[in-house]
Amino acid sequence: MLLVFDTRQTKGPLHSLSGLSTNPVHTIHSVVDDNGSTNIISAPNLLTGMENQGVCISLACAAPSSDLIVASFRPRVEFSGDGSASQMGISQSPTLSGSGKLGCHALLRRTSSTSFVKEQICNGNVSELRMSKSAIIPCSGTGQHLFAYGDESLRGVRTWRLPSFQLFADLRPHHQPILDLRFAESTTGEKYLGCLSEEKLQVFRIRS
């Protein structure tokens, strides 16, 4: 369920919206559509019909619109009749010891104000436990964006070109897994990508 508050008075929500599933909402984005209206996109509510990809653990969108979205999935754990756990769907891949699990990132493109279509998919090493963070970095002049994600095996940020998912670059790794990842743009147009682990905070300036 999503609760909408007025920041001037938070005693109670202005609106409450029921989701499309019983799964917790882990990501919320405020975006502007072609008509200039502000909309809320949340995960996993957006992803009805993609259950076979696994469990959605991250959602990144290209602000301020949401024409391009990348959803990240990890294998779904199912329990058999004897109580033992087995991996289903993309989860046929074995556990990568110390490197998370082999999951995937799916590119979604907006086709209408309420509809998206799945395009490219690429594999990536995702966290077994955390709801990891990801980001889409707009690159002016190239017609392409970059997708950034904290890769578990790399223990650093891996970036891909969109929409092709061609590997772009691996940023300087950490000794610990990436816990948070944020893209920000200043009022003067400077772009930054920040990533955080238990070890350190890194901030990269993006030139495009």
Image (tube, rainbow, N blue to C red):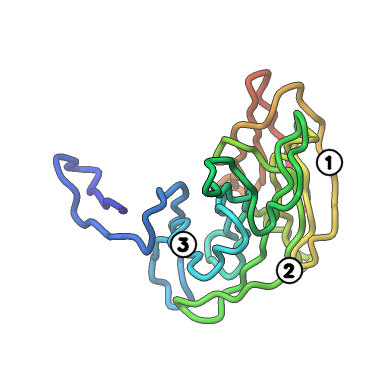
Viewer-nearest of labels 3 and 2? 2
Residue 24 vs residue 63, the one in the foreground: 24
Element on which disc 2 rests:
strand
Q: Secondary structure at mark 3?
A: strand
- Looking at the rendered structure, the kind of residue marked 1 is Asp
Instruction: List x then y, in percent, for residue 14.
Output: 18, 54
Q: Please tell me which residue lies in front, 205 or 12.
A: 12
Residue 158: image location, x then y, percent:
78, 44
Using the image as rendered, state which of residue 54 and residue 152 is in the foreground: 54
Q: In 3D space, how far apart are the residues under numbered discs 3 and 2 (Cα atoms)?
A: 22 Å
| Residue type at the position of mark 2 | Gln
Q: Residue at x 74, y 43 (%)?
A: 125
Query: CA gap, disc 2 to disc 1?
Result: 20 Å
Q: Are marks 2 and 1 in contact (CB under 8 Å)?
A: no
Residue lying furthest top = 199
183 over 19 or under it: above or below: above
Q: Point out residue 151 in the picture as x, y percentages from the top left corner.
A: 74, 40
Would you name the residue on which mark 1 appears? 170
Q: Residue under label 2, please give it.
A: 120
Neighbours of disc 3 within 10 Å: few (<14), some (14-19), many (20+): some
Q: Residue pushed farthest front? A: 82
Instruction: Name the quarter where the C terminus is drawn.
Output: bottom right
Q: What kind of residue is marked 3?
A: Val
For the residue carrying disc 2, how many other residues have a C-alpha within 10 Å: few (<14), some (14-19), or many (20+)? some
Q: Residue furthest bottom?
A: 112
* Mark drawn on residue 31: 3
